Image (spheres, rainbow, N blue to C red):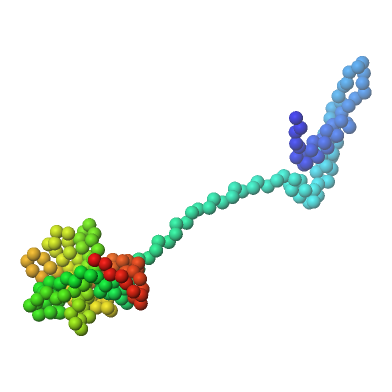
Amino acid sequence: MRIKTHPITAVLTSAYLSAMLTSSLAPIRNNAIFAAAVDPSAAQKALHNAVSGLDAAGWAAAVAATPAPVPPAPKSVPVDPAPKADPVISEELLARLIKRTLASKKPTTFDKDVCRTLGVCDGTANIPVLQVSERMPEGKHAFIVSTVEGSKDIFIAFKTTDGTYAEVYLTDKSGVLRAAAISEPNGTRLITNEQAAAKYKAELELFAKLAKDLPPAGTAVAGNS
């Protein structure tokens, strides 16, 4: 086995052994080797000479001979992609919804009491409308367009699954809330726009998500039942 020796250690050891061998061996008598006392000053001088011979270049070479430890490669940390923001209702998305709703093949009517409460009819008869809707566990969300001649009214409504409670918001293609009402078993009543603002915004966000997958308003939309 070959043992590697550091360059500095080898020089110091060689110098010290040289000093010992030079000054410590006595003549051979009777086939025995008698070692004389080691001269401390001679050993120290030899050691000093060996060390002083290692100038700056010598120390640098000795240090360079020892490879520096290699730091481990940094581990890559996976970065989650930023979540996509929900679409915000716009005139284009509203136009897509209106176009899709008018392509519906199932004409229906809108409750006369609700439209009277919202101030868009006299309450003598239900008004004709077209609608698209989305059913969810909490209830039915509907986008309703009035087909009364000359009307620009749009109703956005939510009705619970059991049909005992409904919220209705009146707007137009601008998306601005014009009026809001709540319908319950004991009747229909107006609420202020401030009271309705949060829930109306939530309905707009829902329909914006649905509208983003519809064709642009400038293209043809196939109606379905």
- Locate residue 41: give its quadrant: top right
Nearer the observer, 174 or 213: 213
| For residue 111, above or below residue 76 | below
- Which quadrant of the figure contains the N terminus? top right
- The residue located at (15%, 79%) in the rendering is 120
Q: Is residue 120 visible?
A: yes
- Locate residue 178: give its quadrant: bottom left
- The residue located at (93%, 23%) in the rendering is 27
Left or right of 130, for residue 25: right
Left or right of 215, for residue 188: left
- The residue located at (56%, 51%) in the rendering is 74
x and y percentages locating residue 152 in the rendered image: 22, 80
Q: Is residue 90 visible?
A: no
x and y percentages locating residue 33 in the rendered image: 88, 21
x and y percentages locating residue 196 in the rendered image: 20, 71
- The residue located at (16%, 66%) in the rendering is 166
x and y percentages locating residue 119 in the rendered image: 14, 79
- Which quadrant of the figure contains the C terminus? bottom left
Left or right of 61, for residue 209: left
The single residue placed furthest to the top in the displayed view is 30
| For residue 26, above or below residue 78 | above
**Picture mark count:** 0
